Image (cartoon, helix red, strand yellow):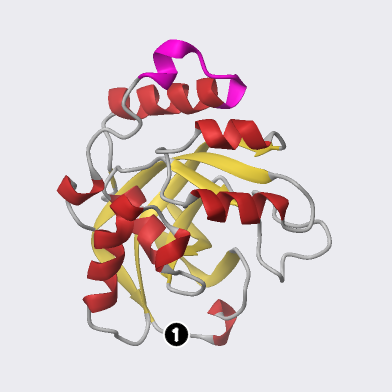
Amino acid sequence: MPPESRFVFKEWAVVCAALACGGQTLILRKGGIHEGREGFRVEHREFWLFPTGFHQQREEITADAWPMLDELQLRDKTRGHRLQLLAVVEEVQQVLDRSALSRLAGRHIWSESTVEQRFHYRTPGLFALTVRVYRRPTPFEIGDAPYFAGCKSWVELPAALSTTGLQPVLDDSTFDRQRREIQQLLAGGADDYLMAPKIHAPFSSLPRP
């Protein structure tokens, strides 16, 4: 992990909450309308997660994640942004096989209809990023600024933020097991992986970010 990072990845706040509590270690991404002709690319291996409510709707996520969404929507709205989570990409794959994404059900909180819509948008395919997430004890408070605006995945901050004091959300063995299971499912899914629990605890029982 670098000593600091200035790169930010915009993601639904409810997905950030699932990543923060260890409910998932997977980010699915198609890309925003401002990504350019080439579409989304994994431009950075380490980045801060930027929680956003843009396009975030109840019907877009699975029912077991609804309590997290309800809690996020009840929280006080404050101006500015809180950056507390750093993600490190351990594996990335562009998934062009729709059936492979079906095997990932339960590894993320996108609803099946969201996966279907995003997969077929423009050209078939989605990126699957297996990420190790680290949490800062107290968040950085970042004021709102024009460079945060727009339907885009990546933002570069004017100054890098220190990664000192970050702690992993999942221990080494738990994360490594989930990483191997995701890769096995994307590769074809052996029976022992398909029968294993898909998340290590119900979202409703996990600590909130």
Residue 122 spot, x, y in % from top left: 78, 58
Q: Please tell me which residue lies in front, 15 or 48.
A: 15
Q: Main secondary structure of the magenta part?
A: helix
Q: Nearer the viewer, residue 63 or 127?
A: 63
Residue at 29% across / 75% down in the picture?
Answer: 73
Highlighted range, magenta: 186-195
x, y percent for residue 18: 33, 51
What amino acid is labelled 1 in the image? Answer: Asp
In this rendering, the answer to whether 79 lies above or below 56 is: below
- 48 and 33: which is toward the camera: 33
Is residue 174 in sight in this rendering? yes
Badge 1: how crowded within 10 Å, few (<14), some, or many (20+)?
Answer: few
Q: In the image, what residue occupies the spot 62% across and 73% down? A: 151
* Residue 43 visible to an observer of this rendering: no
Q: Position of residue 69 (x, y in %)?
A: 31, 65
The C terminus, quarter of image: bottom left
On the image, which quarter does residue 31 sit in? bottom right
Quarter that holds the N terminus: top left
Q: Read off the residue under disc 1.
A: 144
